[in-house]
Image: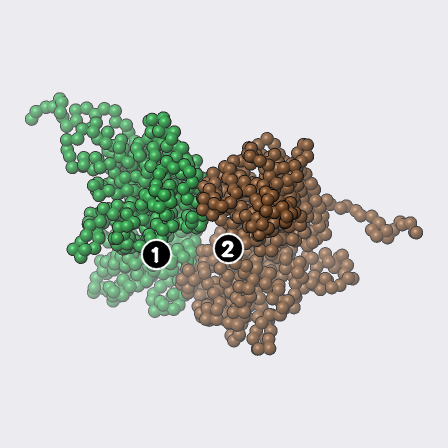
Chain colours: A green, B brown
Amino acid sequence: MNLYVCLLHESTNSIPKLIQHANANNYNVVATSINANMVPLDPYETDPTYPGTLLNAVDWNSKMIFLLSDVDVDSPNPKLREHAKQILLRDVAWAEHLQNVGSMMKRLRGPKIDNLAEIVRAKTKGNWFIQVPISNPEIGSFEHRKDVTDAEIAEAEAKDPWTWWNSLRFAVKHNSKVKVVIELNDLNRPSKETVRRWLGEPIEAIIIPSSLFIRNKANYYVLQKQWQIVIGHFLSARANIIISANPNDLSISQYADYLRKLASDHNDSHILNSYENVLEIPLQPLFDNLDSYTYEVFESDPVKYKIYQNAVKAALIDRVSDIDAPNKLTVVMLLGGGRGPLARAIFNAAELTKRQVRLYIIEKNPNAIRTLSHMVDTLWEDKDVHIFSKDMRDFSPPEQADILVSELLGSFGDNELSPECLDGALKLLKTDGISIPYKSTSYINPIMSAVLHQNVSQMDTIVPAFDYGYVSLLKNVYHIDNPQALFEFSHPNREATIDNTRCKEISFTVQKDCVLHGIGGYFDTMLYKDIHLSINPLTHTPGMFSWFPMFFPTHPRTLKEGQTISVKFWRCVDADKVWYEWQVSTREVWEHHNAGGSGYHMRL
Amino acid sequence: MNLYVCLLHESTNSIPKLIQHANANNYNVVATSINANMVPLDPYETDPTYPGTLLNAVDWNSKMIFLLSDVDVDSPNPKLREHAKQILLRDVAWAEHLQNVGSMMKRLRGPKIDNLAEIVRAKTKGNWFIQVPISNPEIGSFEHRKDVTDAEIAEAEAKDPWTWWNSLRFAVKHNSKVKVVIELNDLNRPSKETVRRWLGEPIEAIIIPSSLFIRNKANYYVLQKQWQIVIGHFLSARANIIISANPNDLSISQYADYLRKLASDHNDSHILNSYENVLEIPLQPLFDNLDSYTYEVFESDPVKYKIYQNAVKAALIDRVSDIDAPNKLTVVMLLGGGRGPLARAIFNAAELTKRQVRLYIIEKNPNAIRTLSHMVDTLWEDKDVHIFSKDMRDFSPPEQADILVSELLGSFGDNELSPECLDGALKLLKTDGISIPYKSTSYINPIMSAVLHQNVSQMDTIVPAFDYGYVSLLKNVYHIDNPQALFEFSHPNREATIDNTRCKEISFTVQKDCVLHGIGGYFDTMLYKDIHLSINPLTHTPGMFSWFPMFFPTHPRTLKEGQTISVKFWRCVDADKVWYEWQVSTREVWEHHNAGGSGYHMRL
């Protein structure tokens, strides 16, 4: 995932010189017409223009984006259409000849895409970059007007370039070699929601015209704050940079340097960024034993164990008064000790509050027990600590606990079976004992993410991938609506008959025309009183990275702004397993009568 | 494919210190017992010995090969067997806990491998390195004795460690995560054929005991010439280096440096080495248009066009005497001009011989025509050269040729359809005209290559991969017997009815117990008189790299030394396509009577 900065200029009389000039000005790649010529450009040239030996194969592949002729292969005029096809096919053949893994870019010209899609589908090598204006300027202006008619909106929406792209994407069957390149325009600053929606698409790059740059007081070329924000969103989503400029512009290196700096400011380079948009099968720590690597990742979270420590501190203080502190023993049971991070947090809490604690650590993974035992021998020799190599559901304790502490929560809260585990551990707890955490809640929302969809589809050849839920660091994603609470579990659960099955349906409102690719899953958990952890995007605990969201895929379907979609989730339990089922439905509203009481109404 | 040099020492009281010491002496990796302990080693220790936090996850994966306990899980004694299983399973669980993509090594102890295979199959993460002595020392000694009985040989062969490995490999279903580590021994220098056979196996590394090193006159530690050759073979096949030595040996860095130097001497680092053991679908230049990258690879061959130039030179001199040279025109037709390398060779030949040449270049790829036309305009303005953008089979020439020059040969000679193309071009040739090349012959031999087999199997989930032939740079391969000639094609073919179908069966003798994984394919071609090109391993044109061998896969089957196997090939032709079929058969000899006339015979 190395960012490139590309210089776009339609014509040149020498590709090698253009590349040399671009390289000298801090651009890695150039984008220029495939019909760039030794003589002045003529896109209708049919004779040879330059030889394939002009560059070597590596350079053709790595230093060039070919701009294909801007012809309309879907023109209503049959003569123009056939001529356009002929030219485009010639361009494609030449590009495929020069590049075997390279890239070519074609501008989308309007809502009709059938013939273009056919040509795109037929290309077998390299990538298609589909160049699309970020929005229809007309729609942008509607956002500030209240007098727009439905007909005007419908007409303008037909011109929404996202809709063109969406048609093409469906027509080429979501092919992962077809990516979108977003063209910015200084006359048309897009709305927030427009930008956000593009982030759910497979973005290759953004095109930034040099006219977007203004001089600051120090006479340097910079971008206005608002454009910095727009472009920053794309850079955060790992879009590459294409600067459209005249190569003779003396400031082109300034543009490149400025944008590289902006990109590095928006590059959240945490240690786990190789997981972006990757689909992982969720861990099953109850069934499988975790390995050292997994423990290490969790242990390195800078925030989680601090917050746990705070929760245990608060609980110790509430349960034992300062006066009783020297004498009254609090029995803490740690359910799932791993390689010791929570035990450390509990010992810290005891020390900081000066409370007496006896700690039982129950851990079912015999490999983790090796490390824990070593810690007892070397680090915790003076502590009142006892290790049991057991499944907590089968553990008979020497005494009952005041506090159960556990971190059995998966990305979707209950998906690592914390309800089942903690219910099974109820017998370990005194009748007035408490559980940290005492509640966990899952959240869902509909999302668009073309990249995640492509990843699911790839797996679908091997497993029924649309029936799996995944853990994924969501990067290229558009939140179609905000998350809402789904299932809730409380601990300890002292009900006579415990039922951990659940079923709930939630409605969401589509904020903008888009495509549903799946359901995002999150959770939050209350540790003690109001001390909590959350990976719900609306309330995410700052800095905590050890849980990624979940993704439950659906087959892609285009949604319209204002539409209501309902998502229904089941948590099912049988003797052997727990699983989720999920269902999406929409309602088509036929007629809505007397809106606002504009017809029949009763006067007060 | 980065070589590593590993220090092997069974026990240590501190893994981190061993790693530090090894790194300081130019080793990247250490191999030590998984039960290495903070206290002296006890392989039957069941209590924790060291914590998982001793190294971080990256180091566990990248710096350690775990030696598993040398226990016999296939012992005939049930009590010992069960105890061994328990220990090995404990070791494996701990290794899987510490490493998620790492490596563990287990010594093969004898011909019985069923229980070990079951444990190997059950492991889901990382690699198994199976440690095997290079040969049975006893068999080595047989090679110099003539009085050995069949029973003695059979008994010794049962102890051939390759046979143990072969049983295990079949039992784990040729899993690509199971690799072999060959252990050398200063008392047992293996025969050439033994070494060659191992080269067909998935070799991870060789273990070189420090006792193999001797001091030279300058007091440096070196290897004897014979060991240099043996080890050199393994290094050429990209084996890694494991040096078994006492860490306190003051010369360990000398051993590492010496072997790194030897490895770099045996590393043929040509530009195409990323293709080693890779399977490629053969090009179909008649059906598909080649791209710039492919042309560039072919054009960069340092030898091929020089030899073509020599052939054309010799032909020109033979057809036109020195006296006629200034006036007599030789018409040369180049069938398949590509981006011009053969045209250049022909012009060079004409200049060097001072013969007058008119060159027609026929090329069906319109993209290559662009480059050729550009060359005519810029490089060959003063030449008598004419380009035709045509399929040679449909070309009506303005005049007939004295010499047809073509390079339509694939790795198997006729597999790019040169017979069909050249037959179709017969009408272009004068009745006394000649073709360069005038003959091509394909060759085959049976080969063992576990790596190629694994690669074919991986593809078999997508296509019927065992019915494809592949182009592959054969690296990890054992030639079971020498190649023999298969099909021959001569040009021009002026027979009344041309039949390009072929069928032939060839017998080969197995040189040593091994596994058949497929058939290697090669060709040679006579350009003019005795000027020729060859990729037959027995006669390979030195320095020529533009053709890799072919590989026709078969399902793995163990063969015995001395056995005869027959390989039958068909070249089939119908209206649309040409294809090969291949069949392997063995004959089981039941009884052979009166060998050497030792019984009934007639005295002279």
The correct choice, above or below, for B493 with respect to B46 in the image is above
Residue B233 position in % (x across, y down):
60, 61
A293 horizontally vs B249: left or right: left
Is residue B130 among what the camera can see?
no
Is residue B531 among what the camera can see?
yes
Residue marked by disc 1: A271
Between circles 1 and 2, the one closer to the viewer is 2
Crowd class of label 2 (few under 14; some 14 to 19; many from 20; radius 10 Å)? few
Q: Work out which residue is located at the far left of the displayed protein and give it.
A: A604
Callout 2: residue from which chain? Answer: B
B51 horizontally vs A321: left or right: right
- State the residue in front, A54 or B123: A54
Residue B187 falls in which quadrant of the image?
A: bottom right
Residue A164 position in % (x across, y down):
31, 34
Q: Decide: marks 1, 2 in contact (CB < 8 A)?
A: no
Residue B228 position in % (x across, y down):
60, 66
The correct choice, above or below, for B158 with respect to A461 in the image is below
Total tally of numbered discs in the picture: 2
- State the residue in front, B529 or A372: B529
Residue B34 position in % (x across, y down):
50, 63
Identified at 52% across, 69% down, the residue is B256
- State the residue in front, B435 or B460: B435
B146 horizontally vs A385: left or right: right
Residue marked by disc 2: B271
Identified at 66% across, 58% down, the residue is B193
B100 horizontally vs B452: left or right: left
Identified by mark 2, the residue type is Ile
Image disc number at residue A563: none
Tell me the CA gap for discs 1 and 2.
Answer: 35 Å
Q: Work out which residue is located at the far right of the displayed protein and give it.
A: B604
Crowd class of label 1 (few under 14; some 14 to 19; many from 20; radius 10 Å)? few
